[in-house]
Amino acid sequence: MTKRSEPARIDARGLKCPWPVLRAARAMRDHDTVLLLADDPVAKIDVPALAQSNGWAIGVHEAESHVEYALSRAGAEET
């Protein structure tokens, strides 16, 4: 199966872990990059751990009411 290069946008606000992590992992099966929006404080630990365990690059941007995680298979820079 060919990976899609356009980023997937996953809005997991309002969901408690492990759901944001599971949705991000599922999206990364079909995409090279994923933008995950999450507001569960546990995601600040779980999403970077997911990225590290899979060798993905991660960029983190804290917005007012949530955190945005940019996950990428290769070539992404940490923000």
Image (cartoon, grey):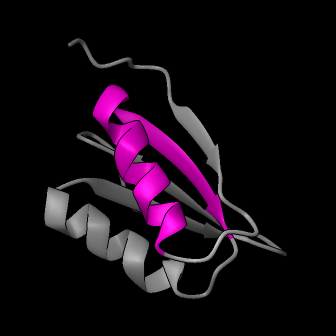
Residue range highlighted in magenta = 18-38
* Quadrant of the image occupied by residue 72: top left
Q: Residue furthest top?
A: 2
Total marks shown come to 0
Q: Is residue 7 above or below residue 2?
A: below
* Side (left or right) of 62 relative to 1: right
Q: Position of residue 54 (x, y in %)?
A: 17, 57
The percent position of residue 15, horizontal first and vertical second, equals 67, 69
Q: Position of residue 59 (x, y in %)?
A: 45, 60
Q: Is residue 79 visible?
A: no
Q: Residue at point 74% right, 71% down?
A: 66
Q: Name above or below for residue 77 compared with residue 3.
A: below
Does the stretch in magenta take in 60?
no
The reply to whether the magenta stretch includes residue 22 is yes
Residue drawn 29% across the image and 55% down it: 57
Seen from the viewer's position, the closer of residues 60 and 23 is 23
Given residues 17 and 33, the one toward you in this image is 17
Percent position of residue 40, x then y:
64, 80
Asked which quadrant contains residue 62, the reply is: bottom right
Where does the N terminus fall, quadrant-wise?
top left
User: On the picture, is 71 further left or further right than 64?
Assistant: left
- Which residue appears at 76% of the width and 69% of the height? 14
Q: Is residue 6 visible?
A: yes
Q: Residue at x 41, y 70 (%)?
A: 47
Q: In front: 77, or 8?
A: 8
Tell me: residue 33, above or below residue 46: above
